[in-house]
Amino acid sequence: MTLPYHPLRDSPSAVTEPTWAHLVWRSLINHYVPEQKLTIHNALDLGTGYGHVVSVGSEHYGINVFGVDIRPEIYQGPKGRFIQADLLNTWPFKDGSFDLVLEHLVFDDLISLQKKACEDVAKHFNSELNRVVREGGIFFSHNSGFHPESPFHLVASDTPFRVYQK
Ligand SMILES: C[S@@+](CC[C@H](N)C(=O)[O-])C[C@H]1O[C@@H](n2cnc3c(N)ncnc32)[C@H](O)[C@@H]1O
């Protein structure tokens, strides 16, 4: 499936800068992960876009990060770390595969730009997130309108970051 160009989604200023990805990982590794006494081996970045979160997480922090996006053409991250998939379908990962899932602006893209029904997308994201995150794993939301439900509970909220644990 090809998503048409949309200036809000596709202009470089709207897409995570590498510096933002550094800030995300620094906050996670130095602050939230030790606070929650977690070990992060496998992580997934939903709607990764250029893949900066994948690049920084794998190259600077040695984490096994994968990026998933419906559009492979804009991905610039490390080879072998990108999976093409439509997040509105079943996510192509086994149950409990990830210690950490990150999301930045994908939910909002689906709701605002692609006019999907908020309740339907939230229900689907809740169900798939709960399936792919291991017990005790975390969901890291930055600047996102998506708020996961139980069994995820909010453990930290420092605008624009929210951290949920399962
Ligand atoms: C606003 S961009 C954010 C990209 C990245 N998370 C960032 O912060 O730079 C939204 C991303 O979601 C992707 N996307 C939109 N709908 C999707 C879908 N149904 N399945 C997978 N990815 C999707 C788009 O291709 C785009 O890369």
Image (tube, rainbow, N blue to C red):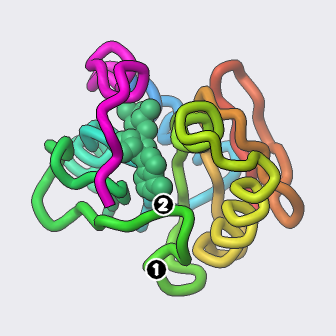
Q: Nearer the viewer, residue 153 or 28?
A: 153
Picture residue at 23% right of the left edge, 62% below the top? 81
- As for residue 45 lying within the magenta part, the answer is no
Number of the label disc, if any, that sits on residue 162: none
Describe residue 126's horizontal placement relative to residue 82 as left or right.
right
Say which label, 2 or 1, has the lower sequence index: 2
Q: Is residue 13 above or below residue 101?
A: above
Question: Where's the C terminus, which quadrant?
Answer: bottom right
Indicate which quadrant contains ligand 1: top left
> Residue shown at 78%/44% (left/top)?
147
Tag 2 residue: 40
Give residue 6's quadrant in the image.
top left
Q: Is residue 46 visible?
A: no
Tag 1 secondary structure: loop
Does residue 163 show up?
yes
Residues drawn in magenta: 1-19
Find the distance from the CA under tag 2 to the CA under tag 1. 17 Å
Task: Report the residue marked by disc 1.
Answer: 93
